[in-house]
Image (spheres, grey):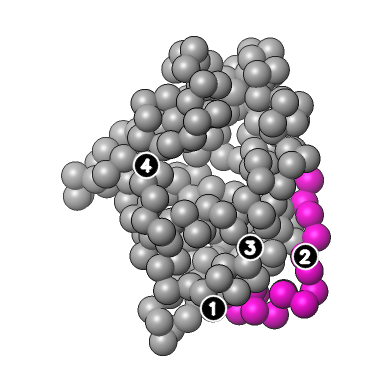
Amino acid sequence: MHKAGIIMSLFLAQFSIAGDVKLGKEKSVICASCHGADGNSVNPVWPKIAGQHKQYTARQLALFKNGERKGTVMAGMVAGLTEDDMKNLAAFFANQKSNTGSADESLVEVGKAVYQGGNAKMKIPACMACHGVAGKGNPLSGYPVLAGQHAAYTEQRLKDYRAGEKTADDDDINGKVMADVVKYLSDDEIKAVSNYIQGLYSE
């Protein structure tokens, strides 16, 4: 196995142990002002984290804490978290139900085409190849749940990837995959697929 793959496997294995949902709920008060008490943020520029795979959430918290993923606000929020705190928070939010949004019908056709079919001419793979038809993702591979995520948040994240913003450590295979996937997407395609994702149901 490639070195990066080994590192990713070890990291995911580290967080495969279930956190304590009750302790996570107690600690989640520091997250509520932005992400909502149950992980369903009201502000569309802040991500919904309800129902997200615990492995993914724990990893992102760790990346914010060690500075590999940049975020001025998040850096301050995670500074005092222990490894157990991150596991417990991840377990709590994974146990919550995401409130799925609705899609703008005028953008669905293009968004669906990108999500389900990609663009063979530009060598852009379908989003569902990793995140699934219903946007459920894959926790073992580190692919997050996308279904119902705010379109504004997804649109900005995709543009960040396209711009080459460093979002994780150098051995993060998934981050490199995303950068390659979106580099040929137009603004209109990014907007459309983000809108389509907002209307997906994970269940």
**Residue of label 3:** 194
Q: Is residue 67 above or below residue 199?
A: above
| Disc nearer the start of the sequence (1/2) | 2
Q: CA distance from mark 4 to mark 3?
A: 21 Å
Question: Callout 2 environment at 10 Å: few (<14), some (14 to 19), or many (20+)?
Answer: many
Q: Position of residue 44 (x, y in %)?
A: 71, 47
Q: Position of residue 34 (x, y in %)?
A: 69, 31
Query: Disc 4, disc 2: CB below 8 Å?
Result: no
Q: CA distance from mark 4 to mark 2?
A: 29 Å
Q: Is residue 51 above or below residue 101?
A: above
| Residue 100 is a magenta residue | yes
**Residue of label 4:** 168
| Disc nearer the start of the sequence (4/3) | 4
Q: Quadrant of residue 115?
A: bottom right
| Disc nearer the start of the sequence (4/2) | 2
Magenta range is 99-116
**Residue of label 2:** 103
Mark 3 or 1, closer to the camera: 3
Main secondary structure found in the magenta portion = helix
Residue type at the position of mark 4: Ala
Question: Callout 4 environment at 10 Å: few (<14), some (14 to 19), or many (20+)?
Answer: many
Circle 1: element type: helix
**Residue of label 1:** 117
Q: Tell me the residue at 68%/57% (across/down).
A: 151
Q: CA distance from mark 3 to mark 1?
A: 15 Å
Q: Tell me the residue at 51%/74% (across/down).
A: 186
Query: Disc 4, disc 3: CB below 8 Å?
Result: no
| Disc nearer the start of the sequence (4/1) | 1
Question: Residue 200, can we see it?
Answer: no
